[in-house]
Amino acid sequence: MAITGRPPSANPRNRNPKAYDWTTVEAAPFDGESPDLPPNGRKKWHPETVAWWDAVRQMPHCRLWTDTDWRFAIETAVLVDAFWCGEANRAAELRLRAAKLGLTHEDRLKLRIRYAAPDGDTDAPPAPDAAAVTRLDERRRRLSSGA
């Protein structure tokens, strides 16, 4: 799936101060304390909901979550379960909640969260190579000479 739009620039061209900077998280599955899915009334959780919850609770940036973030994720699990049980009208709300939870790479870019390998390398876009950039005076000279 293609990422739409540009990711936030590390070097913005305006004079406004950044509201917040990137949050770098080690790219290792979260294995700390996280809540289990609560009982779902008389029925069992859909297997896809259980798989979704297991994936969500291991995301590396879960280590940043507070109790309210975990509650929000559990409430989202209820919507995921309804979606997998045939209520397709839940899809729009799930898309919005997935963005808030940072479930996809694009969502994490918007939240300014990046994963870093244990050696410190991040998944941020690489800096442009200065040697690959044409100097402006050379370009002007080429354009003015008609070459």
Image (cartoon, rainbow, N blue to C red):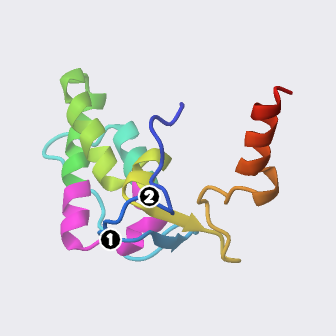
| Residue 88 placement (x, y as % from top left) | 24, 22
Q: Which residue has dot 2 on it?
A: 13
**Secondary structure of residue under mark 2:** loop
Tell me whether the residue at label 1 lies in contact with that at label 2, contact meaning CB atoms closer than 8 angstroms: no
Q: Residue furthest left?
A: 41
| Residue 58 seen in the current view | no
On whether residue 19 falls in the magenta region, the answer is: no
Q: CA distance from mark 1 to mark 2?
A: 11 Å
Q: Residue 29, position in %: x, y?
A: 54, 66
Q: Position of residue 17 (x, y in %)?
A: 32, 71
Residue sitting at 79 percent across and 41 percent down? 141
Residue at the front extreme of this rendering? 145
Three-letter residue code for mark 2: Arg
Q: In the image, is residue 65 above or below residue 100? A: below
Question: In the visual, does 106 lie left or right of 120?
Answer: left
Q: Measuring 48% from the left and 56% from the top, which residue is drawn there?
A: 9
Kindly indicate the quadrant of the structure image that contains residue 130: bottom right
- List the residue tagged with mark 1: 17
Can residue 117 be seen at all in this image of the molecule?
A: yes
Viewer-nearest residue: 89 or 18: 18
Residue 79 in which image quadrant = top left
Please, what secondary structure does the residue beneath circle 1 have? loop
Span shown in magenta:
56-73
The residue mark sitting in front, 1 or 2, is 2
| Label 2 crowd (10 A; few <14 / some 14-19 / many >=20) | few
